[in-house]
Image (spheres, rainbow, N blue to C red):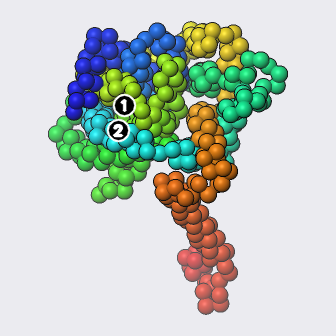
Amino acid sequence: MQGIIDGFMVAFTPANLLFVLIGVLIGMLIGVLPGLGPGPTVALLLPLTFTLEPSTAVIMLAGVYYGAMYGGTITAVLLKLPGESASVVTTFDGYQMARQGRAGAALGIAAIGSFVGGLVATCALVLIAPLMAEFGLRIGPPEYTVIALLGLLLVSAMSQGPLIKGVISAGIGLLLAVVGLDPVDAAPRLDFGVPELLDGFNLVVIIIGVYGISELLSGLMEPAPTAAAGPVGKVLPTRDDMRRSAGPIVRGSILGSLLGTVPGGGGDLPSVASYSLERRLAKDPSRFGKGAIEGVAGPETANNAGAVATFIPLLTLGLPPNPILAVIFGALLIQGITPGPSLVVEHPDIFWGVIASMFIGNLVLLILNLPLVRVWVKVARVPVALMTTGTMLVLLVGAFSAANDVFNIWVAIIAGIVGFFLRKAGFEGGPLILGFVFGSILEPAFRQSLLLSRGDLTIFMSRPISGTLIALAVAAAAYSAFRVIRKRRARAKGQRTLTQPLTTEEAPTNADDSSRH
């Protein structure tokens, strides 16, 4: 309780209140503009954080993140064009509600659900984060090795598209992470005789290129927003809307808070899982996809809850669960602060200040969302191409400012072009970024573990926590493989049944029987 009280004292300073408001407004604006999204925006704002206090910088970036989660809902409902990927599910029923003249109700219930989900996840953050930080102080290099490795595998598996592409993307990130001097014996690796590569690639520059420049290049290929489906209508939901939405909001809050802590959580996973759950629990599943308000309330609640919950592993274990949190992880590193179990002791102003600011930020979201809906509709029609030039310039200035080195500008440009073509080939940038981040954690932890055990790999199985995690991972992999094999056998058996010739007794005897068969 003392920690959260101190956190509110930090969050209620005039500067932090101002930057909460700025972060939430920018996040909503970016969520409304298709083609940008929270990841590139947080990367874009990184240079601005160099001169801010660490707590103020993270408070602003956090506001951008969960503000964008709601901003993407507006275009998803009105234009059937999600501002960011997590809002794709909202288009299924939100746009149908808009076509029925109930866009206001869809946006209103999304605002209420986002507020409740964010509030529940923030309360979970208050309760769970100190316990996880205390737990984190008890784990050593072997545990961090296993956690980082499992995180990479989960992120690769949860990425969109084939699993192999997610693994390859994460592998590219791991390869980029080992460029530079060896952390143990200082031997140069993969520098190709370029002196600037001896220090390795800068995390911020890689993020700006892969997640910022490539996103802008992709945005230029996107079609312009279409006209809105119809009038916004009344924003406040009816009593029947609230009755139908109460259960999905409660379930979405819990589901999002749980999934947000998983590597790869936040973003798409909570909203997709919530939509699937609500459709399965519905008495009449056929209503979904035709304007069911539960299909908006549940995913939007889970979406915001997941966004807030992703800060639990970042602040307590120093493990960013998704690419956007990896950007915020980089912002803390720029400030000379390493997220992890010791953060709550060494920098309680940041730890508790960020948590307290989320209560304020979610309240600001609720207050601003409803009256500004019509403003955001006009903003959504601004062509993205008009903003690309200025945004690109700011990104390149940010790449230079990361180390005051022109070489980083070229790195960002090359990373952006490579990221663009990888995206076109079906490879996501998220696993690449997290592979780069986890690589800087995985290699030192793995080598420290081998030094502790004098090269004995059984150290990872003999320690209780790491051994348990490995056993759970193997069990999960075996179960997944068993399900895949069973489905393939069932499919093959079904195909054999369909292609099997009819017996004499089953053969048709006349035209009517033939048509019936």
Q: Tell me which amino acid carries mark 2.
A: Ala
Instruction: Give x and y (percent) for residue 484.
Output: 59, 63
Quadrant placement of the C terminus: bottom right
Earlier-in-chain disc, 1 versus 2: 2
Instruction: Give x and y (percent) for residue 505.
Output: 61, 91
Q: Which residue is mark 2?
A: 129
Q: Are marks 1 and 2 in contact (CB under 8 Å)?
A: yes
The image quarter in which residue 397 lies = top right
Residue in the image at 39% along x and 26% along y: 346
Instruction: Give x and y (percent) for residue 475.
Output: 53, 63
The image quarter in which residue 18 lies = top left
Q: Is residue 194 visible?
A: yes
Residue in the image at 68% along x and 51% along y: 455
Up-down relation of residue 148 to residue 365 (above or below):
below
Quadrant placement of the N terminus: top left
366 to the left or right of 271? left
Determine the CA span between mark 1 and mark 2. 9 Å
Q: Secondary structure at mark 1?
A: helix
Q: Nearer the viewer, mark 1 or mark 2?
A: 1
User: Which one is nearer the viewer's eye here, 269 or 316?
Assistant: 316
Q: Secondary structure at mark 2?
A: helix
User: Which one is nearer the viewer's eye here, 49 or 306?
Assistant: 49
Residue in the image at 41% along x and 51% along y: 276
Query: Within 10 angstroms of label 1, few (less than 14), some, or many (20 or more) residues?
Result: many
Query: Within 10 angstroms of label 2, few (less than 14), some, or many (20 or more) residues?
Result: many
User: Which one is nearer the viewer's eye here, 8 or 265?
Assistant: 8
Q: How many marks?
A: 2
Q: Which residue is mark 1?
A: 344
Q: Tell me which amino acid carries mark 1.
A: Val
186 to the left or right of 126? right
The residue lying furthest to the bottom in this view is 505
440 to the left or right of 322? right
